[in-house]
C-alpha cells in the first residue's frame, strides 16, 4: 500500500485526465486515446454517485488489498465500457467525477485501487463521508475544485500541501502527519493535545451530539485519557472513545496488516469490545451458487478468511462464524443482538454499521486504516454531523414496512441531492422519533437505520422508544435501559421532517441506486425471475414472517427462483421453530444457512443471464449482486408477492 508519507508532494500533469461523465460514449472515447473532455468551461454532466462497487468489484476485493493486486481492476465494467486494466494502461493520472463520489461500501480498497491504477488526484463535485475519510487517512490527494485540474492542464504545478490546507483542522493534522496511523503513534506517545476547546458550557443537544460530547477526548494519553465536553456542534472534529469495534473477512486482513506495520505486537485496546465475523464468504460454496462465481472467488476468499482467523488467534479477538467459537450470522444482526449498547460509539469496517443505530447508539462504518487506529488507541475521529429529525406518525396498516419508509425517505430530493450539505466535509444523520415507530420492532426499525447510508448519510439513530425498551429488557437485560440517550427538547436540527405513514406508498428502488425511488403502483409491468429474501435488511425474523404471510397457501410462479437466507443462527432457529423455513422449502425456495453474501454476489441468488431480480437487500448498484442484470429493491412482502406472480406485485392484489 502507498504510504501517505511517500505520496507526491507536488502534482504535475504528466499523465491524462479521466472524466467520468453520464455519457458512456465520452468515456469510451477517452479510453480509446481521444483528447479528453474539455474542462475549460462548464463540463458535461458528470457521473452521479460513482460507487465503490464500480471502483473495485466485490469479486476483485477477494484477491487482496495492495495497489499491485487491485490497480488493474479499477473501474472494470464501469458503465459497461471499461475493460480490465484499461485505466492503468491508459496512463490516467487524475480522475474527475460528479456528486456523491465514493457512495456505497466502506471498503478502503477502493482508494487503494485508485493508487494502483496510477491515479494521483481525485476531483469530484462532492464526496461521500467514508470514502473521503479513507482518502485523508491513506494519503490520497483530493479536491472539489475543478480549477485545480485546469491549472494542471495549463502546465502549473500544484503543491499537495495546498490541498491539505483546505481541509478541516483534524484532517489537516493527519494529512501533514503522514496519515492517521502516524498520527496515532504521536497520540500514543503523548505528543498530541486537543486542537478544539475543551472548556465548553453545556447547551441543548440532540442524540448524536450528546453521545459525541460524552465520549469526546479532552486530555491525557493511553493510560490516563479523560473524556467529556459540555457540548459539540456540527462541523466540530473531535476524537471519541469507541465502544464496540468489528471487522469481517473482506477487511480484517488489511486491518491487521496495517495494525502490525504501525504498532507491531502491541496489545489491542479493550479486546473484549472487539469481534471479527466470518460472514461475507461463508455462502460462496452453496450448491446453487454459479460455478463461475465459485471458481473466481472461493480460493482467494478462503485465504482472506484465514488471515482473519490467524489474526484473531494472535491478538486474542472474539470470532463469530460457522464452526467458530461464537454464533454465525450477518455481523450487523449479531452486533444488535449481542454487542451494541445505547449511548455507545459503535464502528465496523462495513458501511451498513448504522444498523446498530436502532440501539440508540452512534454507529457508523469506517475504513481499514481508521479501524487499525481504533483497535490500538480505542479512539475514532468524528466530524460532528448535522442532524435531520424525522418524526413518524400515522398507521402502517400492517402494509407499509420500514423498507418502504426508508426508500421513500432517501429517494426524496432533499437527501438524494444532499441539500443539507454546505461544505465538502459536511456529514449528516437522521434521528428517528415519533409515535409511528411503536408499531414496529427493533428488527424492523433497524432496516431504516441500516439504509440511511444509502442516502448519502453518515448514520441513523433511533430515539428512546417502546420497541427498543422491550428489546433491551427481553434480549439484553433491563439494566441497559438507563443508558438510553434522549434529545433535549430545545435541541437544534438542520431540518425537522414529519412523515405521516398514511402518505407513504409501497415503495421500491429501480436498478442502479437505492435512491431511485418509485412508488410500486408507478413501476409498471416489471417481470421478475429471481427473488432474494436475505441480508441485514431482509433476513430478520420479522422479514421472514412478512414473506411467509404472503406465501402461505400459494405457489411460486413458473420459472421464478427464490433464495431465503436467515441473518443469524438465532433467527434461523426461531424461523425453523415457527415452520417458516419448512414453508419456504416446500414451495421450492432455496433456504441457505445464515450469512451475508447474496447482496454482494457471494452466495445463492446471483442473477443468471437475462434475469431481473427483486431483492430485500439494501444496495442495487450495477453488477453488485455478482452478475449483470437489473435489481429492484423491495420489501419482504413485495418480494414474496412478486415470487407468486412473476412480476413486481402489490401483495394486496393477490
Image (spheres, helix red, strand yellow):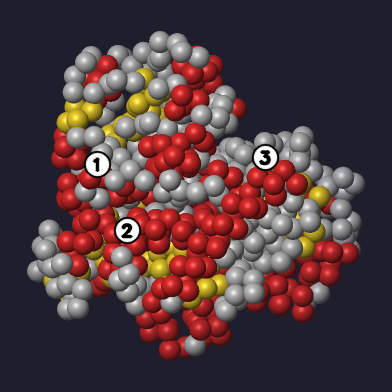
Residue 349 visible in the picture: yes
Q: Counting other residues with Cα less than 10 Å from the Cα at mark 1, is it few (<14), some (14-19), or many (20 or more)?
A: few
Which label sits in the foreground, 1 or 3? Answer: 1
Q: Are marks 1 and 3 in contact (CB under 8 Å)?
A: no
Image coordinates for residue 279, horizontal then vertical, percent: 59, 63
| Above or below, comparing residue 617 to residue 271 in the picture | above
Which label sits in the foreground, 3 or 2? Answer: 2
| Above or below, comparing residue 133 to residue 485 in the picture | above
**Quick one: 528 or 259, which is closer to the camera?**
259
Q: Are marks 3 and 2 in contact (CB under 8 Å)?
A: no
Q: Which residue is mark 2?
A: 261
Q: Which residue is mark 1?
A: 6
- Element under disc 3: loop
Mark 2 or 1 closer to N-term?
A: 1
Q: Counting other residues with Cα less than 10 Å from the Cα at mark 2, is it few (<14), some (14-19), or many (20 or more)?
A: few
- Find the distance from the CA under tag 1 to the CA under tag 3: 37 Å
Q: Is residue 483 left or right of residue 280?
A: left
Image coordinates for residue 499, horizontal then vertical, percent: 49, 55
Image coordinates for residue 352, horizontal then vertical, percent: 49, 57
- Find the distance from the CA under tag 2 to the CA under tag 1: 15 Å
Image coordinates for residue 295, horizontal then vertical, percent: 69, 47
**Quick one: 561 or 404, which is closer to the camera?**
561
**Quick one: 644 or 163, which is closer to the camera?**
163
Q: Is residue 465 left or right of residue 201?
A: right
Q: In the image, which disc is placed on residue 627?
A: 3
- Find the distance from the CA under tag 3 to the CA under tag 2: 36 Å
Tell me what residue is drawn at x 27 percent, y 57 percent. Answer: 181
Amino acid at each position: 500500500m502507498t504510504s501517505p508519507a511517500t505520496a507526491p508532494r507536488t502534482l504535475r500533469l504528466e499523465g491524462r485526465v479521466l472524466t467520468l461523465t453520464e455519457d458512456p460514449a465520452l468515456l469510451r472515447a477517452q479510453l480509446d486515446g481521444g483528447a479528453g473532455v474539455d474542462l475549460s468551461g462548464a463540463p458535461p454532466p458528470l457521473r452521479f454517485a460513482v460507487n465503490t462497487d464500480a471502483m473495485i468489484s466485490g469479486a476483485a476485493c477477494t484477491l487482496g488489498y495492495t495497489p499491485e493486486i487491485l490497480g488493474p481492476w479499477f473501474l472494470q465494467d464501469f458503465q459497461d465500457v471499461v475493460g480490465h486494466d484499461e485505466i492503468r494502461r491508459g496512463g490516467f493520472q487524475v480522475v474527475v467525477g460528479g456528486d456523491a463520489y465514493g457512495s456505497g461500501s466502506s471498503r478502503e480498497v477502493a482508494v487503494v485501487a485508485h493508487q494502483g491504477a496510477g491515479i494521483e488526484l481525485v476531483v469530484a463535485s462532492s464526496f461521500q463521508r467514508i470514502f473521503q475519510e479513507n482518502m485523508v487517512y491513506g494519503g490520497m490527494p483530493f479536491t472539489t475544485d475543478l480549477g485545480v485540474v485546469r491549472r494542471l492542464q495549463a502546465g502549473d504545478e500544484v503543491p499537495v500541501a495546498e490541498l491539505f490546507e483546505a481541509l478541516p483542522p483534524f484532517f489537516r493534522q493527519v494529512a501533514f502527519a503522514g496519515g492517521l496511523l502516524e498520527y496515532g503513534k504521536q497520540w500514543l506517545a503523548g505528543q498530541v493535545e486537543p486542537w478544539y476547546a475543551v472548556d465548553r458550557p453545556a447547551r441543548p443537544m440532540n442524540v448524536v451530539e450528546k453521545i459525541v460530547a460524552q465520549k469526546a477526548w479532552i486530555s491525557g494519553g493511553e493510560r490516563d485519557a479523560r473524556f467529556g465536553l459540555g457540548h459539540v456542534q456540527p462541523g466540530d472534529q473531535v476524537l471519541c472513545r469507541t465502544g464496540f469495534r468489528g471487522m469481517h473477512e473482506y477487511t480484517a486482513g488489511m486491518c491487521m496488516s496495517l495494525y502490525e506495520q504501525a504498532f507491531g505486537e502491541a496489545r489491542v485496546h479493550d479486546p473484549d469490545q472487539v469481534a471479527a465475523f466470518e460472514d461475507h464468504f461463508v455462502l460462496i460454496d452453496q450448491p446453487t451458487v454459479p460455478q463461475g462465481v465459485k471458481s473466481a472467488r472461493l480460493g482467494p476468499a478462503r485465504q482472506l478468511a484465514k488471515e482473519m482467523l490467524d489474526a484473531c488467534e494472535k491478538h486474542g479477538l472474539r470470532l463469530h462464524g460457522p464452526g467458530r467459537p461464537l454464533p454465525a450470522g450477518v455481523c450487523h444482526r449479531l452486533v444488535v443482538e449481542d454487542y451494541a449498547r445505547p449511548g455507545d460509539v459503535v464502528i465496523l469496517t462495513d458501511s451498513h454499521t448504522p444498523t446498530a443505530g436502532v440501539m440508540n447508539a452512534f454507529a457508523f462504518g469506517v475504513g481499514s486504516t481508521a479501524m487499525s487506529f481504533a483497535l490500538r488507541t480505542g479512539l475514532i475521529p468524528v466530524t460532528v454531523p448535522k442532524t435531520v429529525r424525522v418524526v413518524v406518525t400515522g398507521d402502517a396498516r400492517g402494509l407499509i414496512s420500514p423498507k418502504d419508509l426508508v426508500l421513500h425517505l432517501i429517494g426524496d430530493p432533499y437527501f438524494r441531492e444532499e441539500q443539507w450539505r454546505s461544505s465538502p466535509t459536511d456529514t449528516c444523520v437522521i434521528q428517528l422519533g415519533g409515535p409511528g415507530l411503536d408499531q414496529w420492532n427493533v428488527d424492523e426499525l433497524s432496516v431504516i437505520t441500516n439504509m440511511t447510508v444509502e442516502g448519502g448519510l453518515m448514520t441513523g439513530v433511533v430515539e428512546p422508544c417502546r420497541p427498543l425498551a422491550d428489546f433491551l429488557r427481553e434480549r439484553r437485560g433491563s439494566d441497559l435501559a438507563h443508558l438510553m440517550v434522549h434529545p433535549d427538547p430545545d435541541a437544534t436540527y438542520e431540518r425537522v421532517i414529519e412523515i405521516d405513514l398514511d402518505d407513504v406508498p409501497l415503495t421500491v428502488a429501480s436498478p442502479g441506486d437505492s435512491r431511485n425511488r418509485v412508488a410500486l403502483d408507478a413501476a409498471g409491468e416489471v417481470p421478475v425471475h429471481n427473488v432474494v429474501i436475505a441480508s441485514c435488511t431482509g433476513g430478520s425474523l420479522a422479514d421472514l414472517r412478512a414473506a411467509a404471510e404472503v406465501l402461505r397457501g400459494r405457489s411460486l410462479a413458473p420459472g421464478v427462483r427464490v433464495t431465503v437466507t436467515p441473518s443469524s443462527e438465532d433467527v434461523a432457529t426461531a424461523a425453523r421453530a415457527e415452520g417458516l423455513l419448512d414453508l419456504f422449502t416446500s414451495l421450492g425456495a432455496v433456504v441457505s444457512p445464515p450469512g451475508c453474501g447474496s447482496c454482494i454476489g457471494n452466495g445463492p441468488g446471483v442473477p443468471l443471464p437475462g434475469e431481473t431480480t427483486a431483492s430485500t437487500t439494501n444496495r442495487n448498484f450495477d453488477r453488485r449482486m455478482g452478475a449483470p442484470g437489473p435489481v429492484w429493491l423491495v420489501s419482504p412482502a413485495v418480494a414474496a408477492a412478486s415470487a407468486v406472480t412473476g412480476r413486481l406485485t402489490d401483495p394486496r392484489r393477490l
